[in-house]
Amino acid sequence: MAAAGIALHPACRVRREGFGLLFYDLRGPRLLFAETGDLIPVDFFEAPRGMDEFPDGVSARQKTVLQKFVKQLLDKGFLREQ
Amino acid sequence: MSNKYVEMGLRAPVNLTWEVSLACNLRCTTCLSSSGEPAAGELTTAEALDLVEQVHQARVFQINFGGGEPFMRPDFEQILDACHSRGIMTCISTNGTLIDAERVARLSKTKLVAIQVSLDGASPATCDAVRGKGVFNRAVEAVKLLAASEIPTSINTVLTTQNAGEIPAMYELARSLSVSLRVSRFRPSGRGADNWEQLRPTPSQLLEFSDWLAKSGDVRTGDSFFSLTSQERQGLGLNLCGAAKLTCCVGPTGNMYPCAFLQTDRFFAGSLRERSFQQIWDDSEIYDSFRSLRIHSCEECTRFDQCHGGCPAVAWHLKNDINGGDPECLERCVTSIADTARIAAAA
C-alpha cells in the first residue's frame, strides 16, 4: 500500500519570512506564523510528498519536531493528505 | 494574531488593496474614495499587468480589488486572469450592477476568486438611500447569480446610523440567498467625510453592534471593527491596525499608501511609476512610521491589548492626529454614553 502523501491545501499559500514560514488560508482568511528558521525550505510544501520525507541534512531530533509540525498543519487544514 | 512576528516586519504584505479605477456608475454617499469619473492617468493595462507580476514576485498572497467599480475597467478580467494564472488569490468588491450570467460563468473558471457585493440595507428604501434608486434589486440579482455558482460570495454592508437596526435582517437576507454577510466600518473618507455627521452610527448603535457581533461568529468584518471587538471574537482576526505591516494600498494611478482610507498626499508612500512595489514596501518612510506607530495615549486602557489604539485613519480624519487613538473604540463609546446620561440627568 502506498504511503499517504501530503501537500498544501489548494486554498492555502506559504512563503518564507525572517522568522521561518508564513502560511495563509484564504478560507478564513487566517495566518499561521511558523518559527521554523532555516529548517524547512518554502518549496517543501509546494509539491506532494510522503509523511516521512524531509529535507536532506535534517537530524533525527529535527525530524521528530518536523513530524509534529506537519501533523499540526494537517490538523489546522493548511496541509491535506492526498 | 501574533504581533511579535508582525512587528519583526514582513517581507511583503499578506494582502494588497488595489483600487483599480475611480470610475463608478454609482455615487454612493458612503464611498471612501468619492468615485465617479476615472482618475487622470490611471494605470494602463501594461502597467497593471506589470504590477501583478511584481506582486507575484513579492509573494503577496491575495489582492483585494476595489475602486470605484472594478468592472468599469474594460481590462479588469485580463488583470484577474493574470493574477489567477500566477496563483494569486483575489477578492473583488463590486456594486453588483455589472454582474451578469456570462461574467459569472467566466469568473467561475477559477477557484481563486471571491466576490463581495455591496448592499447597504435589508430593504430597497434603506439601501437605495445610500447607493441610488433601483440598486438594491440589481445587487440582489447579482448575488443570486453568484450564489448559484461556486464563487465564494458575500454581501458587504457598511454600518451606518440608517442601517444599524437592519443588520440582523441583513444577516437573514444573506442566509436566505445562501451567501455570507460581511459588515464594514463607515469611515470619514471621500464622500464618507462629506456625509459623516448624517450617517455615522451613534455610540449606542456601535455598542449594540459589538454585542450582536459577539454572538455572530460567522459574520466577517474584514478586521475593520477590531477596536469594537468583544472578548468573544478575539482570535478571529486582527487586534491591531495592519496598515504597512500586513497590508497596503495601491491607488488607480499606481500611488501606494498605507491603506485605502489614507489615500492623501500626507500618506503617500511612493509611485509605482518611479519605484518598484518591493522597493516602496521596503523603503517608504511613511510605511516605516506606521510600523513603529505606538498609540501611547491608549496604553493605559484596559483594552489596549485588544485593539492597540484602533484605526489610525479614523483618528486622522476626525482629529487630524494619527497618534490620537480611535475616537470610536469600545471604551470611548461606553464613556460617551455615560457622559450623555450624566448630562441628561443633571439637566
Image (cartoon, coloured by chain):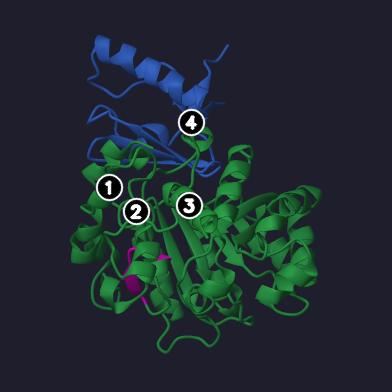
Residue B287 visible in the shown view: yes
**What amino acid type should be assigned to the residue bearing mark 3?**
Cys
Q: Are marks 2 and 1 in contact (CB under 8 Å)?
A: yes
Label 3: few (<14), some (14–19) or many (≥20) C-alpha neighbours in 10 Å: some
- The residues tagged by marks 1 and 3 sit, at their Cα atoms, a distance apart of 33 Å
- The residues tagged by marks 4 and 1 sit, at their Cα atoms, a distance apart of 24 Å
Q: Secondary structure at mark 2?
A: loop
**Residue in the picture at 72% in, 54% down:** B170
- Indicate the position of residue B42 as horizontal and vertical percent values: 43, 83
Q: Secondary structure at mark 1?
A: loop
**Residue in the picture at 49% in, 24% down:** A74
| Of residues B273 and B198, the one drawn nearer to the viewer in this rendering | B198
Q: Secondary structure at mark 4?
A: strand
The residue pinned by badge 1 equals: B10
- The residues tagged by marks 3 and 2 sit, at their Cα atoms, a distance apart of 31 Å
| Of residues B347 and B77, the one drawn nearer to the viewer in this rendering | B347
User: Which numbered marker is on residue B333?
Assistant: 3
- Indicate the position of residue B94 as horizontal and vertical percent values: 62, 68
Q: From the viewer's perspective, is residue B142 above or below residue B42? A: above
Q: Are marks 3 and 2 in contact (CB under 8 Å)?
A: no
Check the residue under mark 4 and report the chain it is in: A
Check the residue under mark 3 and report the chain it is in: B
Q: Which residues are magenta?
A: B254-260
Say whether disc 3 or disc 2 marks the residue closer to the N-terminus: 2
Residue B24: name its quadrant. bottom right
Check the residue under mark 1 and report the chain it is in: B
**What amino acid type should be assigned to the residue bearing mark 4?**
Ala
B27 magenta-colored: no
